[in-house]
């Protein structure tokens, strides 16, 4: 049975007499991206006794573009794994009374709702599934509505709050809701907050931002062998706990990991996640509130719990007047090829192969050489070396793989690149093998700011038809977890005996980095890089907080430009014009005093961004190590 859907715009309207339902609410992250692990979410549900909400954050610019491509060609516009996730999580979530909120609906949340209801029916569960989705004058794919041109707008928490107020559903499926808003919505609903409680919304948004990338808060994407402050035993990663948060009605926020789990939750993991994908920390924009995180600080309560404080509304503007809309546009056809060389002279053979393919392309399709990027995997594909890309500084290498990647206006040009590349088998240098090629159309998401009045959304609810008498009891997963509980706890006791460095900012003796000698930045700081469109940001967080003052003297705009310039090269074997860097790349450096860190933003450096980049690392995630391997003198 489906209820009538209500149409609203995104103009902020205060809630009428909001009710405080809880003193504290517990919100967990079950997924931090579309490729996350469902079994980790199930473990979190089993291990944490009180979990009011579980958020599955599975939508990004890349996956949104993929869903648009899929739906436009007759496929699914929602996350194809939604059935897998729900089949695993629904029985225990329903038993515990945990509401699941997810953006797996992408551009077809109604289609995702139908799949969830199908799964629940197969499991014999009686549930209700709500949908919160953007809507407007648009078009349809396969009979399903899609906003104009496949556009998706980052909307805030209000549609989810309405679902909770009107329906109290077991599952809420959304379209493109801002990541932090997925987590903020249950806080607003349960704690009686209103849309003008900006101080509370700022703290709630901080909690959402820290949780949204899942295990990146609890030791995932943090461990680094050889770094005394980030090294850990491999099994600690094997049993990572997804994070969850305890949020009080007064805005007090603590982030947690499950007791007895692996991973790490400390001030360093929190600091890295705080600055992930952030540009100006004084004005982090979300649809519900613009927050200032410069004074955020983290205070360990235990080895599994960190208190987070200091987020506040931005002084510039507390609520954005416009919302960000993403509009998919065809950006061309990608064609690529790879070939491996080993043994003596392998680098020179790769160089010869690149020369040949570029020459053959010029013969058949003149004028497209600047569309092709090439690099050598195993040598310089990530540019993560302090050599500034100089060929003379390369060490002998006997196991490499040449990749050439082109982005063309026409499909036939992309296909031609694959043909010319394949011809290396009989026309190129000796000993090349393992050729692979491919081509595909690429989509870029064009960004526009639109008025709140122009963005419309609806909510609705539908129930399974299963009667109560048919509902199956689901206790076996809990029983199985209990049967193995002691062995898991014993294993983790042994693992955490490595030292007390994971309990907070204390532990391993932290001392100033040496002065007057050349050292890698690794020994001074840690970092994480995040992308937004064609821009990258990376944090620099000193191991010894007072070292930040010496770092500020080194990390200048020109220093950053010089280091990042190697990323703009189109070939491993061609010199790059320095003028290109100065004309296209801009750098912003922000001081984040609360965590004694720098946040560095570099514009126009990701080869067009994740959806059309020709680089092997489309997101630019490895740029953090490009920075940290640089030699500096403090």
Image (cartoon, rainbow, N blue to C red):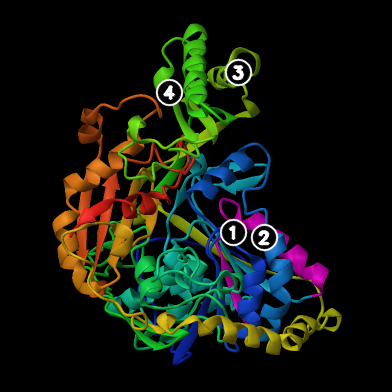
**Disc nearer the start of the sequence (1/4):** 1
**Disc nearer the start of the sequence (2/3):** 2
Q: Which residues are magenta?
A: 98-124
**Disc nearer the start of the sequence (1/3):** 1
Residue under pointer 1: 104
Given this view, does label 4 or label 3 mark the residue nearer the observer?
Answer: 3
Q: Position of residue 468 (x, y in %)?
A: 81, 82
117 left or right of 122 in image: left
Q: Which residue is at a point 31% across and 74% down the rendered structure image?
A: 202
Q: Position of residue 570 (x, y in %)?
A: 39, 28
329 left or right of 505 in image: right
Element at label 2: helix
585 left or right of 160 in image: left
Looking at the image, residue 192 lies above or below residue 450:
below
Residue under pointer 4: 371
Q: Position of residue 118 (x, y in %)?
A: 77, 63
Looking at the image, residue 155 lies above or below residue 66:
below
Is residue 113 found inside the magenta-colored segment of the image? yes
Q: Which mark is residue 424?
A: 3
Name the quadrant containing residue 476.
bottom right
Is residue 601 found inside the magenta-colored segment of the image? no
- Dot 1 surroundings within 10 Å: few (below 14), some, or many (20 or more)? many
Q: Is residue 282 visible?
A: yes
Tag 2 and tag 1, C-beta contact below 8 Å: yes
Residue under pointer 2: 82
């Amino acid at each position: 049975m489906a209820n009538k859907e209500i149409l609203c715009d995104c103009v902020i309207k205060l809630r009428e007499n909001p009710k405080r339902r809880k003193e504290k609410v517990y919100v967990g992250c079950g997924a931090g991206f579309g490729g996350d692990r469902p079994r980790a979410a199930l473990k979190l549900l089993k291990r944490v006794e009180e979990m009011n909400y579980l958020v599955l954050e599975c939508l990004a610019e890349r996956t949104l573009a993929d869903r648009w491509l899929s739906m436009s060609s007759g496929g699914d516009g929602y996350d194809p794994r939604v059935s897998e996730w729900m089949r695993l999580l629904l029985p225990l979530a329903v038993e515990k009374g945990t509401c699941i909120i997810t953006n797996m609906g992408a551009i077809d949340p109604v289609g995702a709702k139908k799949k969830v209801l199908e799964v629940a029916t197969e499991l014999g569960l009686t549930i209700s599934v709500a949908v919160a989705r953007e809507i407007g004058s648009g078009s349809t794919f396969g009979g399903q509505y899609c906003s104009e041109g496949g556009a998706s707008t980052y909307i805030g928490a209000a549609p989810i709050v309405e679902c909770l107020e009107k329906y109290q559903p077991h599952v809420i499926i959304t379209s493109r809701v801002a990541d932090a808003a997925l987590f903020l919505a249950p806080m607003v609903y349960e704690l009686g907050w209103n849309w003008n409680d900006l101080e509370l919304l700022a703290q709630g948004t901080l909690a959402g931002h820290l949780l949204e990338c899942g295990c990146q808060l609890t030791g995932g994407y943090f461990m680094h062998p050889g770094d005394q402050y980030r090294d850990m035993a491999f099994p600690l990663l094997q049993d990572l706990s997804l994070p969850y948060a305890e949020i009080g009605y007064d805005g007090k926020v603590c982030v947690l990991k499950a007791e007895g789990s692996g991973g790490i939750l400390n001030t360093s993991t929190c600091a890295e996640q705080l600055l992930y994908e952030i540009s100006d920390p004084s004005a982090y924009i979300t649809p519900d509130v613009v927050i200032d995180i410069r004074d955020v600080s983290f205070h360990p309560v235990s080895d599994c719990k960190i208190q987070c404080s200091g987020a506040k509304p931005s002084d510039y503007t507390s609520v954005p007047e416009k919302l960000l809309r993403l509009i998919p546009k065809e950006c061309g056809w990608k064609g690529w090829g790879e070939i491996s060389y080993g043994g003596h002279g392998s680098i020179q053979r790769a160089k010869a192969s690149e020369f040949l393919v570029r020459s053959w392309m010029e013969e058949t399709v003149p004028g497209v050489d600047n569309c092709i990027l090439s690099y050598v995997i195993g040598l310089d594909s990530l540019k993560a070396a302090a050599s500034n890309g100089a060929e003379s500084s390369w060490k002998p290498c006997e196991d490499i793989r040449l990749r050439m990647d082109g982005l063309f206006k026409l499909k036939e040009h992309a296909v031609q690149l694959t043909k010319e590349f394949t011809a290396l088998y009989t026309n190129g240098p000796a000993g090349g093998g393992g050729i692979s090629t491919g081509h595909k159309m690429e989509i870029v998401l064009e960004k526009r700011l639109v008025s709140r009045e122009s963005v419309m959304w609806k909510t609705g609810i539908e129930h399974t038809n299963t009667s109560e008498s048919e509902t199956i009891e689901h206790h076996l997963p809990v029983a199985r977890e209990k049967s193995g509980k002691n062995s898991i706890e014993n294993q983790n006791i042994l693992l955490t005996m490595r030292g007390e460095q994971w309990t907070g900012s204390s532990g391993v003796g932290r001392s100033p980095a040496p002065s007057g000698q050349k050292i890698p930045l690794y020994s001074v700081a840690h970092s994480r890089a995040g992308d937004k469109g064609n821009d990258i940001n990376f944090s620099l967080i000193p191991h010894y907080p007072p070292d930040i003052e010496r770092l500020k003297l080194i990390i200048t705009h020109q220093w950053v430009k010089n280091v990042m310039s190697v990323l703009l090269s189109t070939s491993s074997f061609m010199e790059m014009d320095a003028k290109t860097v100065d004309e296209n790349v801009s750098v912003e450096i922000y001081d984040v005093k609360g965590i004694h860190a720098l946040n560095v933003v570099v514009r126009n450096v990701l080869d067009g961004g994740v959806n059309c980049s020709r680089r092997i690392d489309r997101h630019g995630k490895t740029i953090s190590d490009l920075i940290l391997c640089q030699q500096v003198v403090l």
